Image (cartoon, rainbow, N blue to C red):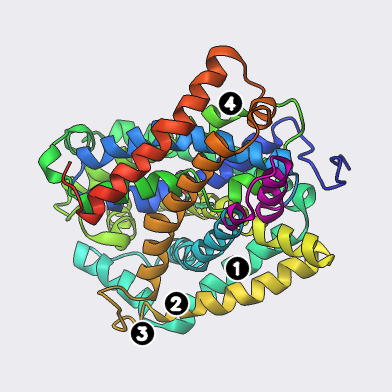
Amino acid sequence: MTTNNSSGPLWAGRWGFVLAATGSAVGLGNIWKFPYMTGEYGGGAFVLVYLLCIAAIGIPLMMTEIAFGRRGRGSPVEAVRRVVAESGGASFWRVLGWMSMICGFMILCFYVVVAGWSISYLWKAVTGGLDAASVEGMAGIFGANNANPLNLGFWSTLVTVVTMGIVGKGVQEGIERSVRWMMPGMVLMLAVLIIYGMFSGGFGRAVDFLFGFEFDQLSGAGLLAAMGHAFFTLSLAAGAIMAYGAYLPAGKSIARTTFTVAICDTVVALMAGLAIFPIIFANGLDPASGPGLIFMSLPLAFQQMPLGTVLEVIFFIMLTMAALTSAISMIEATVAWLQQSRGISRARAAWSTGVVLWLVSLLVVLSFNVTAEWTVAGRNFFDWLDYLTSRWMMPLGGLGLSLLAGFFLKSNVMRDELGLAGVRYALWLFMIRYVTPLAIVVVFIDALGIAEL
Ligand code: PHE
Ligand code: NA
């Protein structure tokens, strides 16, 4: 086994890190969340802000996170502690490692439930359970799937077990081995779906909706949502990228891998939008129908297509694999931290994490039926987990990391780790010092309504 200087594991294959990080980034965020958020927040203006956030915030921060992970060679908690200590920084910066680990855990608590929707729909597609003839009928199937906690809990439990099983096997034997076949498989299936989609026509209105900017449509809430989604979709400030960075062999280019991951992620999100909105408009569906959007619109469209069932099965296999390769990245930080801080085996760390995760995820399951109406400030448990993590914890964690890396570390630390010099280093430094934190702060201020942009 290849190991690093603190005798932890490293990605074995040449493509190990890129596959794992792209697997982390490309997930339900791209195919489930991006389309329904774009629908809710009115289309083009949301998309534009989201893209700007990827460029101004996402890319510089992803580079920074990978550098922290590799420099610290440990779980995010350890990595941040070591990198801060190396520069003699104040110990309160350690909160950034803890917050990102907890954030990844919190996201996974609801992510397994949504991934459960995906597998249950795969099952329905295979067994002919998606045969409603109208939008209302599909909405009924979606509602019924959520209404029974035992049904919903069964599927999310399955996702939890598979996720923890993969992570428990280790970085190379578990994570790397699974992304090595799931990622190419996903790309292949996505290609089949897109080629098919290109011949089914009807892109016009979707393109208008996604790329026609009407600025007056974007509220402060929409801005915050777009920024939060940029974090979510790139897996930032949630422990995932930093944890994976810890296994990146020395000498690999951080900048290059970051661009690869960010571009793949963006392309998949935009393609998902281009695949889904034509169907929405052609069937007179409401683009603002929320988290159920793809589960109501796509099955309906698949029914009217030749070979529809085959495509539907391919789609839900693809979606499930996208979800799994992201889920494993969200929990790696916690498992690595437990393993390192308690000196226990990876398998034990994974199963004990899995039990806690499972219990909290059952509360999320209940928030779709039994406790759906138990809301605080209009949000139930599921809504709160999603809202707190992507609107607040990730942007705040990102703000903290950018300030720490930009101003408070010894100047050689990030430069050495990023392996950049001259203009390239200067550009990263300028972004991480000024552009990234300012962009985050401006969105926060606007969202809080303190100032109007
Ligand atoms: N990036 C993943 C997606 O788009 C979600 C994710 C968030 C993964 C945070 C890891 C950490 O689905
Ligand atoms: Na994503």
Return the residue at label 1. Answer: 160
Decide whether residue 128 is among the magenta residues. no
Q: Which residue is mark 2?
A: 365
- Tell me the amino acid under the disc marked 4: Ala
- The answer to whether 392 is drawn above or below residue 180 in the figure is below
Rounded to the nearest angstrom, the CA distance separating label 1 from label 3 is 21 Å
In which quadrant of the rendered image does the C terminus lie? Answer: top left
**Residue identifier under label 3:** 371
Secondary element type, mark 2: helix
The residue sitting at 71% across, 26% down in the picture is 252
Q: Is residue 125 above or below residue 245?
A: below
**In the displayed structure, would residue 127 be above or below residue 226?**
below
- Are the residues at dot 3 and dot 2 in contact (C-beta closer than 8 Å)? no
Amino acid type at mark 2:
Val
Query: How far apart in space, not on screen, are marks 3 and 2 (Cα)?
Result: 9 Å
Residue type marked 1: Thr
Can residue 167 be seen at all in this image of the molecule?
A: yes
Instruction: Label the magenta part by its dominant secondary structure.
Output: helix
Residue 255, disc: 4
